[in-house]
Image: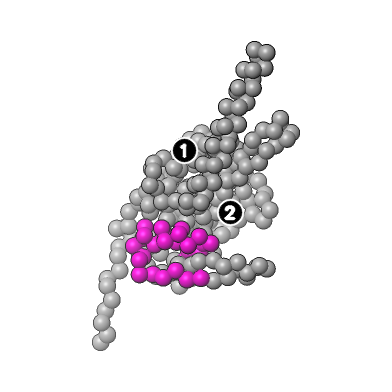
Amino acid sequence: MGKRGPKPRDPSSIEWSEKMAYAVGLIATDGSLSKSGRHIILVSKDKDQLETFKNILGLQRIKIGTGYSGRGDQKEYYKVQFGDVSFYHWLQGIGLTPNKSKTIGALAVPDQFFFDFLRGCFDGDGSIYAYWDPRWHSSYVFYLSFVSASRPFLEWLQQTSRRLVGVRGRIGQGSRVLQLRYAKRESLALFERMYYATGLPCLERKFVKAQKIFSINETHNKNAQVAELVYAYA
């Protein structure tokens, strides 16, 4: 008789935490559950993101692989795949399924950890971008956005964020998929809740980009206020 492996964990023993919620956000956007019933996969173009993911879930022995997209320019990506039946079932229990991209909906994420989860979604499939809009006296405009092929998932993100913070956002059709987008003040409100402390797991390049955008906006606002004062007293 062969040697038995370790006894599987009880899915009920897996607990929510700030780090776990962030990891689930990554899985909900850039990850997938295989049809095997045991394997979880996460892909990213950022190797450091997968290192953070591994550290959160205690996957130090799992190697990061590489692959290439099947699209024109054959971009390289990084990949982590591991088997954990209990964690797989736990993820199913909160609402994730195989082939979820177009079917994912509301997930059973506790309010306490929702913004850690949202930060994971942002690092997975989210973005922040800015531009100068000449139509409004060279106004500086920026948006925080989340994308998905599933409207119910974006509607759940939108409704939960509105309930917890009061931001509205807007869902519209992007270039290929749907996009939930927040403009200036709402972006700042969400960002403050997602990055509520230092040292939180996050993708550094997106955090740094956001900080640069906010800094430019703050400088622009100060310059605009000075210009208004000069005009008022001229």
Residue sitting at 63 percent across and 69 percent down? 74
Residue 180 percent location from the top left of the image:
59, 45
**Distance from the alpha carbon under mark 1 to that under mark 2:** 23 Å
Q: Which mark is residue 192?
A: 1
Q: Nearer the viewer, residue 20 or 50?
A: 50
Residue sitting at 38 percent across and 54 percent down? 20
Residue sitting at 60 percent across and 38 percent down? 183
CA neighbours of label 2 inside 10 A, class few (<14), some (14 to 19), many (20+):
many
Q: Are marks 1 and 2 in contact (CB under 8 Å)?
A: no
Q: Which mark is residue 74?
A: none
The nearer-to-camera label among 1 and 2 is 1
* Left or right, residue 74 beside residue 99: right
Identify the amino acid type marked 2: Ser
CA neighbours of label 1 inside 10 A, class few (<14), some (14 to 19), many (20+):
few
The quadrant in which residue 186 appears is top right
Decide: is 168 above or below 72: above
* Left or right, residue 118 beside residue 154: left
Which span is picked out in magenta? Answer: 41-66
Residue sitting at 25 percent across and 82 percent down? 3
The quadrant in which residue 101 appears is bottom right
* Label 2 residue SS: strand
* Left or right, residue 29 beside residue 72: left
Decide: is 122 above or below 74: above
Residue 233 percent location from the top left of the image:
64, 12
In the displayed orientation, state which residue is furthest to the bottom. 1
Residue 39 percent location from the top left of the image:
43, 69
Residue 36: say if magenta: no
Q: Which mark is residue 148?
A: 2
Q: How many marks?
A: 2
